[in-house]
Image (spheres, helix red, strand yellow):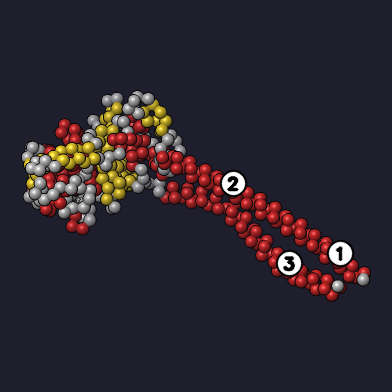
Amino acid sequence: MLPSLKHAIRFCRKLFPVCLPPIAKIFTLFSVSLIILPFSLLARTEDESFCSSEPISSYILKETGSSSLLMAKDIDRPVSPASLTKILTCTIAIESGRLEHDVLITEESTMVEPSKAGFKTGEKIKLLNLVKAAMVNSSNDAAFAIAIYLSGNIDSFASAMNTKAKMIGMKNSRFTNPAGFDKGIYAGNTSTAGDLLRLTEYAVKNPVFNEIARLDKAVFTEETTHKVYCLKTHNKLLDKYPYAVGIKTGFTNKAGGCLIARAIKNNKDILLVMLNARTDRWSVAENMFDMAFLGSKPDPALIFQTSNRDTGRAEVVSPRKTGNRKYHVTKAVLRSKRHMLALSRSSHKVKRNTLALSHSGRKLKKHDLAFSKQVRKNKKRISLS
């Protein structure tokens, strides 16, 4: 029995010095990582928000009839305006005096990328209805049909666009096509927030333009087959914001989200131009309009801070059409809250795991002490024997 006991003691002496340090290291590293992980996630979130603190490349907010700007950033910076280009295309069409003329749809005008109305070669559409399709649904085939009808080809119409732009006072713009394409043979189609504001202020003086810009859908028929076209707007602000009255949206991969919006409330007429938005442009537009209508100068830090965090931790007062003023929590705010709850739950799990490991560590220490005592007792017995 004595030799076997001695062998057992030697084995345990060899085993525990080898095993215990790795266990202690693993326990320590695991505990520290679990504690640090939630904070690192939070830090990452804050860093990402900081890096994206400029979610819109350029913008301008102004009350019509006023010479002062409420908000502005990089208003002379040339960027791709995407389908905001169609405002100039439609303005030229409206001023042509041929809105009631039938336009023959050519094959060239159908050979465009979406979005488009889906016109077929040989169909006849009134010029007025092409303007509606281009403004309301942002139909590229409608814009091309307008250009080919009025100028014979795209290059000639682009030249007419640039001439009209200079006449309006758009000094930093260059247009290559009527739809707003910005790649390939149409590369170089650029404008600025300042120029697009001048264009919009010019266009809204025309009652026909104003009527079309307010539409949420355009319904019309083809002149020979009487095929019905029903085209819906891409402007979500018309549904989201009760004081919105148009005007035009735009998007390409290069241009990002673009928006020219107009809102009227209590005799205040506000225009907003937003270019290359990498955030929820609808919620940002609502915030900007609300602050402008309150009579105070909008605070960019507040607007874009809330935008960067999925439109914010603060609820925005936005009256519905019923006249009742309510606080509305956006989906983005709910997502933010769910995210914070998830992190909170994660931290609670970390605490529980840490406590469990701590208890496990104390148990290991107790077992180690008990084993050491047993070893010492056995040593005494061996020495006595």
SS for dot 1:
helix
The residue sitting at 83% across, 61% down in the picture is 373
Query: The residue under label 3 is which amino acid type?
Result: Phe
User: Of marks 1 and 3, which one's residue comes earlier in the chain?
Assistant: 3
The residue sitting at 27% across, 42% down in the picture is 234
When asked about the image quadrant of residue 306, the answer is top left
Q: Which residue is the site of mark 3?
A: 16
Residue 348 numbered mark, or none? 2
User: Which image quarter is the C terminus in?
Assistant: bottom right
User: From where the camera sits, is residue 267 visible?
Assistant: yes
- Residue toward you, 268 or 282: 282
Q: Residues within 10 Å of mark 1 (few under 14, many from 20)?
A: few
Please state the horizontal and vertical placement of residue 75, each as a whole percent of the image. 28, 43
Image: 132 above or below 40: above
Image: 383 above or below 317: below
Q: Residues within 10 Å of mark 3 (few under 14, many from 20)?
A: few
The residue sitting at 44% across, 50% down in the picture is 48
The answer for how far apart the CA atoms under marks 3 and 2 are is 33 Å
Please state the horizontal and vertical placement of residue 381, each as a whole percent of the image. 89, 67
Q: Is residue 8 left or right of residue 100?
A: right
Image: 75 above or below 68: below
User: Of marks 3 and 2, which one's residue comes earlier in the chain?
Assistant: 3
- Residue toward you, 4 or 215: 4
Query: The residue under label 2 is which amino acid type?
Result: His
Residue 377 numbered mark, or none? 1
- Residue toward you, 160 or 335: 335
User: Of marks 2 and 1, which one's residue comes earlier in the chain?
Assistant: 2
- Residue toward you, 192 or 207: 207
SS for dot 2:
helix
When asked about the image quadrant of residue 76, the answer is top left
